[in-house]
Each structure stands twice: as C-alpha cells, then as structure tokens.
Image (tube, rainbow, N blue to C red):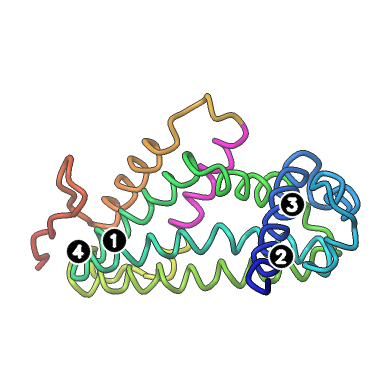
Amino acid sequence: MARKTKDEALATRSQILDAAERVFGERGVARTSLHEIAESAGLTRGAVYWHFKDKYDLLSALWERCRLPLEAAFAEIDAQLVDDPLARIRQKTRGVARSIVHDPRTRNMMGIALLRCEMVDEIAASRARLVGERDACLDKISSEFAAAILQGQLRKGTDARAAAISLHALIDGLCYHWLLDPSQFDFEAVVAAATDQWLTGLGAVLSPGKAGPRRPARRR
C-alpha cells in the first residue's frame, strides 16, 4: 500500500509538472497562476500546493527535470573521451542541440526560459537559481577549455573562462532565434558548424567529418 501511495504521489507530481510546462509555454510564467495550472492538470489547487510551494518552485522543478538527463549524457561523453577535452566540448554542444530539437521537454523548457520567463521582481528566487545553474555550467565548460589549452588543442594564452562564456552565449543565441521560428534553419547543423568555426578561431585544427580534433602543430 505504501508503495502504491508513493507511486501515486510521483504520478501526481509529474502530472502537475506537465501541466505547468504546458501553461507556462502558452501564457508565460508571470501571467500564469497556480489555479490555472491545477485546472490544466485536472487537480485542485491544494493538490498543487502539496507538492510545490509556488509557481517558481514549479519552474525550478521543470528545469531540474530537463537537467538530469543532460548530465547523464554528459557523463557518458566524459567516460568515452577521457583524454580528449576538445572532443568532449564538441560532443556536449551537439548533444545539447540534439536534445533541444528532439526532446519535447527540453525544447519546451528552453522556450519557457528564453521566451516566456519575464524577469520581474517576483521571479527573483527562481532567477537566482537559474543563474546559479548557469554559473555551475560555465565552471564545467571552463575546466574543459583549460584542459584543452593545457594539451595544446587550443592556442596558448586563450582565456578559458571567456571562451566558456562565449560558447554558452553562442548556443543560447542560436537557440533563442531558432525557437522564434524553427523553420528558418537546421538548429543541430548550425550549432555544429558554428561551434567548429568558433573553435577554429581559437586555434583548434578539426578533422572534417570526425568528432574528435587533431592537435595543431606546435607553435614556436
């Protein structure tokens, strides 16, 4: 009986998250009420409050639901490309683009974050959490760039943190414009090409048609 109750609670929580994802995408976060989310889920507002303290708690839970599968995919890439940080950067970038295009939850969450999440005062707590997640992501990307520089895969003297921020902004910007009108370009293809062109500008020598890079000749 206890197991059934736990499963039912998880199912209800998922039902609420699905409704929040749907309503946030249609109306935007600031204009959505918990009552509307409850109605969309076919539940009472009390049921929503049982699982989430407010709609911004819901927003954070939606982000977490998308983040965990991506982190699992990144862990696999880390295990497969232990000694090739530049290849890890390329594969993770492509993995993010693939997830945005083919996974509805990830695509919807990015749409909410970039197009439907008004940065008003009442969303300060959720915004702070999203900024914290972004900074943690930048720390990880920076470490990848630092490793690539150390191995001679990128130009000596490259600023790893600036490179991480720039790559993050490149992907975010492409995602924003693709979400506005997905018919305008092939997001996966453009992300792959833009990332490789950008990495080439940092001194990377990339093998055409291959996931991993060749190391550049040593610069005297």
Question: Nearer the observer, disc 3 or disc 4?
Answer: 3
The residue type indicated by label 1 comes to Arg
Q: What predominant SS class does the magenta segment belong to?
A: helix
Q: Tell which circle, 3 or 1, labels the residue nearer the N-terminal end.
A: 1
- Queried whether the magenta region covers residue 169, the answer comes back as yes
Q: Tell which circle, 3 or 4, labels the residue nearer the N-terminal end.
A: 3
Q: Nearer the viewer, residue 89 or 161?
A: 89
Q: Secondary structure at mark 3?
A: loop
Asked which quadrant contains residue 122, the reply is bottom right
The residue type indicated by label 4 comes to Gln
Question: How far separated are the C-alphas under marks 2 and 3?
Answer: 28 Å
Q: Nearer the viewer, residue 92 or 41?
A: 41
- Residue, disc 1: 88
Mark 1 nearby-residue class (10 Å; few <14, some 14–19, many ≥20):
many
- Residue, disc 2: 9
Q: Residue at x 53, y 61 (%)?
A: 67
Question: How far separated are the C-alphas under marks 2 and 1?
Answer: 38 Å
The tag on residue 153 is 4
Q: Nearer the viewer, residue 123 or 38?
A: 38
Q: Tell which circle, 4 or 1, labels the residue nearer the N-terminal end.
A: 1
- Residue, disc 3: 117
Q: Tell which circle, 4 or 2, labels the residue nearer the N-terminal end.
A: 2
Q: Which residues are magenta?
A: 166-180
Q: Is residue 180 above or below residue 212?
A: above
Residue 194: x and y in percent read 37, 42
